[in-house]
């Protein structure tokens, strides 16, 4: 059973890594599940409860970071209320109409359209959109970092 669990855990981590870069593959959730599966099947939960709690919190924060960082990035680059609303609408429209690429591109286009609708010129709208892109990239980096923490925590338990 030990080898089977280990293979399943590594498959979950591999799919999770892909999911960090491809929308709608629940990347971090799969990595977290891989870690939890290993912890509970090796009966290491008692000794690693604090780490489990910390990694769970880090996973939740990273999951919420996509939308939050994109909108914060847009706001940092002087996006107005219409740009933020456009980004949110763009996310939903892109997700449901142009999956999977619309999930990534929708918020950026939405910020741009929202800024244009508010009366800003194209240059300022592009600047706001660029802020959303930077926020998204920061979020992706955060998710990759949490994935690495989950992987290293799992590997650490395997070599103990």
Image: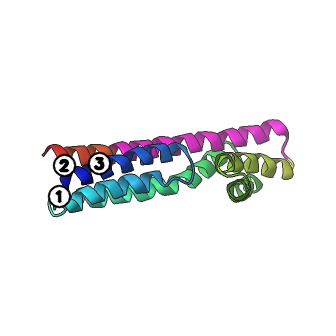
The label shown at residue 157 is: 2
Location of residue 52 (image quadrant)? bottom left
3 or 1: tag closer to the N-terminus: 3
Q: Which residues are magenta?
A: 120-148
The label shown at residue 104 is: none
- Comparing 64 with 31, the one in front is 31
Question: Mark 2–mark 1 contact, CB under 8 Å?
Answer: yes
- The answer to whether residue 140 is magenta is yes
Picture coordinates of residue 66, whole percent (x, y): 55, 51
2 or 1: tag closer to the N-terminus: 1
- The secondary element bearing badge 3 is classed as helix
In this view, 148 is above or below 92: above
According to the picture, the residue beneath numbered tag 1 turns out to be 42
According to the picture, the residue beneath numbered tag 3 turns out to be 7
Residue ID at (17%, 58%): 42
Task: Give the Cα separation between the discs numbered 3 and 2.
Answer: 15 Å
The residue carrying pointer 3 sits among few (fewer than 14), some (14 to 19) or many (20 or more) residues within 10 Å by Cα, namely few
Q: Main secondary structure of the magenta part?
A: helix
């Amino acid at each position: 059973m030990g080898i089977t669990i280990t293979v399943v855990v590594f498959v979950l981590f591999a799919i999770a890594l892909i999911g960090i870069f491809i929308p709608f593959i629940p990347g971090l959730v799969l990595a977290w599940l891989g870690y939890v599966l290993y912890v509970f099947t090796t009966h290491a939960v008692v000794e690693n409860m604090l780490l489990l709690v910390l990694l769970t919190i880090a996973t939740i924060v990273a999951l919420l970071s996509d939308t939050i960082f994109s909108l914060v990035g847009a706001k940092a680059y002087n996006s107005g209320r219409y740009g933020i609303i456009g980004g949110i609408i763009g996310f939903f429209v892109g997700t449901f109409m142009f999956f999977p690429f619309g999930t990534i591109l929708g918020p950026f286009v939405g910020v741009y359209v929202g800024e244009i609708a508010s009366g800003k010129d194209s240059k300022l709208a592009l600047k706001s959109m660029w802020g959303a892109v930077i926020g998204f990239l920061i979020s992706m980096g955060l998710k990759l970092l949490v994935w690495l923490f989950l992987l290293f925590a799992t590997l650490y338990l395997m070599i103990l």
